[in-house]
Amino acid sequence: MMGSNVAPNIAIAAEGLGKKYLIGHESADQSRTLRDAVSGAARKFGRSAVNMMRGQAIIAGEQIEEFWALRNLDFTIEQGDVIGVIGRNGAGKSTLLKVLSRITEPSEGRVTIRGRVASLLEVGTGFHPELSGRENIFLNGAILGMTRGEIRRKFDEIVDFAEVERFLDTPVKRYSSGMYVRLAFAVAAHLEPEILIVDEVLAVGDAEFQKKCLGKMHDVAEHGRTIIFVSHNMTAVKSLCTKGIMLEGGMIRTTGSIVDVANEYEKKGVQTSTYEASGSSKKPTCFRRISTEFHDGALHTAIDIASASKDRMIVNLRLRDYLGSPIGMASLGGYDPELMVELHPGDNRFVITMPCPTMANGRYFLDLDLERPYNHMVDQVVDNLSFEVSRVPAAHARLLQSGWGAGSVELSAQMVRSNEPTASIASRALTAPSV
Amino acid sequence: MNTTPSSPPQRLATGEPATAAIAAPGEVTFILEAGRADRNYWADLWRFRELFAILAWRDVAVQYKQTVIGIAWALVRPLLTTLIFTGLFSRIARLPSEGDTPYPLMVMAGMLPWFLFSTILTSASGSLTSNSNLISKVYFPRLIVPAASAAVAMVDFMITLVILFALMATYSFAPSWHLIALPLFIVFVILAALGPAFMMAALSVSYRDFRFIVPFFVQFGLYVSPVGFSSKVVPESWRTIYALNPMVGIIDGFRWCLLGGNAQLDFVNLAIGLAVTLAFLWLGIRTFRATEKTFADLV
């Protein structure tokens, strides 16, 4: 079969798409004697040599397993569609984007793409710290597929958007992280491909800037371009996209209008109060197991952290509501280094109690970060854990429900009758609070 | 784990059946499939020429940043090597020069293409791993990466060429009309380097062993090629075999261009060298193209 056999208004058509990786595991029993170690090394060398002769990649580990990151994907995307791809970590979202943006080749099936593709899988790809802001705009623009003429034409717009006029000739390694992200996104935001593929890039930058980026993407969408968008921020996905694809375990679970798909996804999130590191994503230092439960007005979370060495790290607990919007964060060590978590080599178990006595009843997501100081992320569990707050109201009272759309924190207030002018009440309340 | 059975094609669109249609003229359509050769590859390479230029420019701009003597590093290496080789081969081993050319000039004329060759080979073979952040995040024809790092070697080459002319001036040595052929030999050495460079670049993505092999190969090559001595010191009967090393013909060619009538050009040796070069170039590009699509998974 040669050439394209899809209808003319189709931008992307996937038929039986699959992507396979080979992953290796070390066998559990470790060699105890020198002889075992030597014979093990010899076997490994023999296998690597055979692999090389056959022109295959070397895979570390004793047992080799096939892992299908994507399997049997069939879908079509029309020109002008704005598609949200949603799914939990490890569902295959990033792999799908990598295949669609031609970074990696599918292992089976085929994809027909009509139109020029630009992908934004990371903010600031190819930025060089030694080069100035001006130089990096040209470098990054070229990497994303813009011509020099195009960049020159949009240069002022990019600089305006990024708000970095004064630092254009400063090496970007001297930029604050906010400036860096703004500049990087500004370049990407001015791409004009027929198909734009965007991965979780809005997760960085402050709220104000995120809003600006979303606005920019709305503009792009309105110009009839096809956009494929991955984000954990369901609010952003819902407001930007018209259609959705939900992936689960590398396969399509639901497709359709974004509202239906998002509802399905949020419903799916309900059952999971535990997390277990999967074989393929195991790093030497990581969250191995987490379970969480809300009772007695507090969130109780048990975590097992595997550590490669003796270390001190920060653990963040971030809460999001059922729409995916952030509510708040507790940090062990992030604000006060005294509270950092002491890790011993091997497994470490902790129990974290987080009182949340005034949270609205409803379903929430819990994300955890394991990081070293200064934002060196070691492991993250995002979109995997959820819990239900169900406080019992006192007699005749009601509790705020998160589903009412009034927010996630129940606030309290007192009221007394008064005849005084409002201005003087406010100033007195400020100086002498009386409860 | 997922237990959903594989579902029939789910159409996000109106459910219109997929029918044969010819893409509108001027529209880019491409098909991604396992092992499918890209028909537009060379057109794509041309479309990304600006990326090539800008990556080359980036590497040049960054190379000497935060060094104390900066671009002077490009002077130190050829000058010191000339000094050592002159001492070693002329003073101690008492090897003859080409005709009556001063020995340092002959060494430098040979070193010029050798350093271009070895710099291209070394930097290009490591270029994919050092640009892994690009390769795993953006699509472009990967051949651009080693090619751009080769362009950086040209800058050092040009500087060394200027030094050579300065050195010739101090020896009051005038080049002859042969100089006009120099650009041809520069192209020759670049082609000779690119073949193995593409191959090493591709192989070192899967097998990091080549990180150790390439420096060893370069070091070894320096003594196997007639850099510090004239190719005439090799016995007559061995010269044809010696010419299988393309650097022999290239170095002879450089000396012929730069040192004028004092060096002779053997066209048979040159042809052998060119054939080997083209064979390696073909093999290099083939190896590279065959493995290119897996780079993002391995790098």
Image: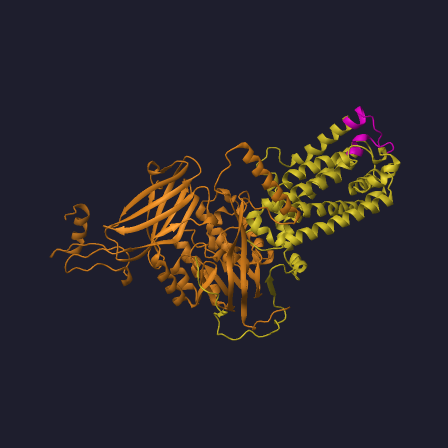
Chain colours: A orange, B yellow
The N terminus of chain A lies in which quarter of the figure? bottom right
Residue A288 coordinates in the image, percent (x, y): 40, 45
> Magenta residues?
B88-107
Left of B144 or right of it: where is B189? right
Left of B154 or right of it: where is B255? right
Point 54% across, 70% down: residue: A10
Point 57% across, 49% down: residue: B298
Nearer to the camera, A317 or A50 = A50
Taking the magenta stretch, the answer to whether it contains residue B254 is no
Residue A372 coordinates in the image, percent (x, y): 41, 40
Residue B119 coordinates in the image, percent (x, y): 68, 40
Q: Is residue B83 above or below residue A419?
A: above
Residue B232 coordinates in the image, percent (x, y): 86, 35
The image shows a total of numbered marks equal to 0
Q: Quadrant of residue A271?
A: bottom left
Q: Is residue B165 visible?
A: no
Residue found at the far top of this picture? B92
Q: Quadrant of residue B115?
A: top right
Nearer to the camera, A91 or A400 = A91
Point 68% across, 51% down: residue: B287
Nearer to the camera, A20 or A61 = A61
Q: Is residue A334 visible?
A: yes
Q: Is residue A11 above or below residue B57?
A: below
